[in-house]
Structures are given as C-alpha cells and as structure tokens.
Image (cartoon, rainbow, N blue to C red):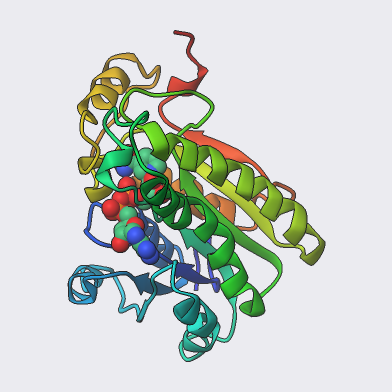
Amino acid sequence: MSGLLAGKRLLVTGVITDASIAFSVAKLAQDNGAQVVLTGYGRLSLVERIARRLPQPAPIIELDVTSPEQLAGLADQVREHVDGLDGVVHSIGFAPQSCLGGGFLDASWEDVATALHVSTYSYKSLAMAALPLMSPGGSVVGLTFDATKAWPVYDWMGVAKAGLESASRYLALHLGKKGIRSNLVAAGPLRTMAAKSIPGFEQFEQAWTERAPLGWSLTDQEPAARACLALMSDWFPATTGEIVHVDGGYHALGA
Ligand SMILES: NC(=O)c1ccc[n+]([C@@H]2O[C@H](COP(=O)([O-])OP(=O)(O)OC[C@H]3O[C@@H](n4cnc5c(N)ncnc54)[C@H](O)[C@@H]3O)[C@@H](O)[C@H]2O)c1
C-alpha cells in the first residue's frame, strides 16, 4: 500500500452529505492508503448511501457524541473492523438556531449548553472513547472556524469554537505523555449542511471570496481535508496543540 497514510487506521466522524468536510477526508484518506471506519449520527441510512460513494467500502458505527452509552461502546465496535487507531477525526458541530444568526444576547443556557456539548466537550469525549485503541504516534484532528475574533451571525458557535480551540490545547497537554497529538484545522467557509443552517452565512462567503489573499472556493473541501490528512500523517511528528489555517490566508489580514 502506498500514499501519505499507507497502513494507517482512521476513525472519521461527521459524514452526512458528500459536501461534508469529513467525506473529503475519508475519500482522500482511502486514496492515500488509509483504512477508514466512519461514525454516523442520526440519519444512518443517508450516511450509508453517501459512504457508498467512497472509493472503498467503509464500515459505519452509530455515534451520538453526547451519548455516554454510545461513547462507552465505541472502542469495542471499532475493534470489530480494525485492531487499533492511528488517527481520529472530529468533524462535528451543532448549535440550536437561537444560538446563531444574531441571537447572541437572547439564546438560553439550555440551547448554549447543547451547542457546547456537541461542538466543544465532544472533542474530549471522542478522543477518550478512542484512546484505548490509540498508541504513541496517534493523532486527533478537529475542525474549527477561527475563534480569535467575533464574527457576525456566528454567535454562540464562535464561543463553542473558542472552547474547542482551548480543549484541543488541553488535550495536547494531557495526551502528550502518551505520545498522542491533538491539532485543529481552521477552515474558511464551505457550503456544507452545517454552514447552510447558519442564517447570514453568505456574509462569510462574500468576505472570503473578495478578500482571501489566495482566493477561496466555497465548494472545495479538499484543501481542508488535505490538512487533516497531513496532521494525521508522520510528517507532523512534533506538532500538537496547533491550529493550521486553511482559509486562503484570510486570518492574516487586518480589518
Ligand atoms: N462548513 C464550514 O464553513 C466550516 C468552516 C470551518 C469549520 N467547520 C467545521 O467543520 C466540521 C464539519 O462540519 P461540515 O461543515 O462538514 O458540516 P456537515 O453538516 O457536513 O457536518 C457536521 C456533522 O456533525 C454531525 N453531528 C451533529 N450533531 C452530532 C452529534 N450529536 N453526534 C455526532 N455527530 C453529530 C452531523 O451529523 C454532521 O455529519 C464542524 O465542526 C464545523 O463547525 C465548518
């Protein structure tokens, strides 16, 4: 087997459509020699249909990252398909509508708590659920949207992402002694199902299209997926707690 991830065994969460960043990660990973196990949430028959578009068959395990039972059973279910994991991809985000689109001042704690549970705390939960299968050299990768700034309409999801960025650094701290890395990819705006659920998302689209130094495609998930692959490869062996921006250079600009 050849390729950047030859022989690596990956767990990829977050496929729901073929526009999902996770779908691009799974596809590219298979193309580059990895064995991929998917997890799916909610509409599993849809995930199965999308997974059939991958170059190779990939088993699908049901996982709601807020379910303690499903998290507790994850490692055993993964073991039915692979004997260990070299990489884990967290490509999951959700916030109730009240938390997005300008509702920052009015969103209830219950709704904000849901956003933080699914989008922030779950990064740690997923890593811990997969940990029994991981060994030194392993890599956990998640997806963020640059949380160093307050964006219009992103609201509590921005807070959730700021928490995710911090959680990744703490995971790097606590899993470093086991030789396991934790890094994030900060992607620019991409037209996925999650993005479409954000009222006013087109403001990001316009800003990036007009201003990103390298230009930006709203429908090309591959640059973000490539960065995920690189972070799970052997080519970033001493990098952890890092955030790699895959945004056409937008983050480097001033106002
Ligand atoms: N699309 C963008 O513009 C963009 C930019 C930067 C970062 N991101 C991040 O990329 C990641 C993937 O999102 P995407 O844009 O590919 O959208 P997507 O809608 O394709 O993927 C989001 C996934 O989260 C899953 N999910 C939601 N609740 C879950 C739960 N309780 N348990 C398990 N899975 C659950 C959904 O099933 C879906 O597969 C998210 O973290 C998102 O915030 C997206």
The answer to whether 216 is drawn above or below residue 194 in the figure is above
Q: Quadrant of the C terminus?
A: top left
Residue 164 screen position, x and y as percent: 54, 46
**Is residue 101 rendered to the left or right of residue 84?**
left
Please provide percent x and percent y for residue 128: 62, 69
Rendered location of residue 190, percent (x, y) = 29, 39
Residue sitting at 45 percent across and 23 percent down? 150
Q: Is residue 164 visible?
A: yes
Q: In the picture shown, does residue 64 fall above or below 27?
A: below
Q: Residue at x 44, y 67 (%)?
A: 65
Residue appearing at x 55%, y 71% in the figure: 8
Residue 174 located left or right of residue 117: right
**Extreme residue in the top direction:** 255
Q: Nearer the viewer, residue 203 or 233?
A: 203
Question: Does the image show residue 20?
Answer: no
Determine which quarter of the picture holds residue 51: bottom left
The furthest residue to the bottom:
80
194 left or right of 170?
left
Viewer-closest of 66 and 111: 111
| Foreground of the two, 221 or 189 | 189
Residue that lies at the very extreme toward the right in this rendered image: 177
Residue nearest the viewer, comparing 118 with 213: 118
Q: Position of residue 60 (x, y in %)?
A: 34, 79
